């Protein structure tokens, strides 16, 4: 477990653990992620925030995402279409669509 850097931090972590209902393991994960106790307390969902996950679940999710080796769903990955064209020029964003014709007058 990561130790707090400042002397008063231990009390803040204990308060955050109590108010957020965190396990010792979740507190260690939060410290390792570089979160501070105030940010945990600020992220306690209110009754009107039904969409917000409990703090322990939120910390575990962030920890899992940061320490995951496989790409997450929705994360940009390279596909064969991302390779440069044979001419060495980057592909146009409208690849496959004809260019509008202009009559040359500006």
Image (spheres, helix red, strand yellow):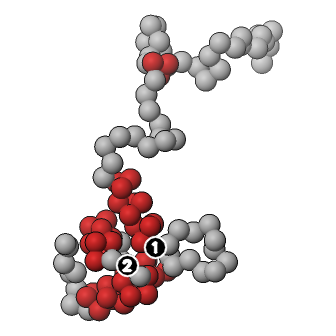
Give the camera-side residue of 48 and 99.
48
**Marks 2 and 1, the one that precedes in the sequence:** 2
Secondary structure under badge 2? loop
Q: Is residue 85 above or below residue 71?
A: above
> Please, is residue 72 above or below residue 67 in the view?
above
Return the mark for residue 55: 1
Q: Quadrant of residue 7?
A: bottom left
- Taking the image as shown, residue 28 lies to the left or right of residue 37, namely left
Q: Identify the disc placed on residue 22.
A: 2
Task: Give the percent coordinates (x, y) of residue 49.
Answer: 63, 74
User: Alpha carbon of mark 2 to alpha carbon of mark 1: how far?
Assistant: 8 Å
- Dividing the picture into quadrants, the one containing residue 33 is bottom left
Residue drawn at the location 33% of the way across and 72% of the way down: 26
In the rendered image, residue 78, in percent from the top left (x then y), is placed at 43, 28
Please indicate whether residue 104 sits to the left or right of residue 44 in the image: right
Marks 2,1: beta carbons within 8 A: yes
Q: Nearer the viewer, residue 37 or 50?
A: 50
Residue 46: percent from left, percent from top: 60, 80
């Amino acid at each position: 477990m990561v130790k707090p850097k400042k002397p008063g931090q231990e009390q803040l972590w204990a308060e955050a653990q109590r108010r957020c209902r965190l396990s010792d393991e979740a507190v260690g994960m939060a410290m390792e992620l570089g979160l501070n106790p105030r940010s945990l307390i600020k992220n306690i969902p209110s009754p009107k925030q039904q969409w917000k996950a409990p703090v322990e679940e939120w910390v575990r999710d962030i920890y899992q995402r940061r320490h995951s080796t496989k790409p997450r769903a929705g994360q940009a990955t390279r596909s064969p279409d991302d390779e440069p064209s044979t001419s060495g020029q980057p592909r146009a964003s409208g690849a496959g669509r004809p260019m509008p014709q202009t009559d040359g007058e500006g």
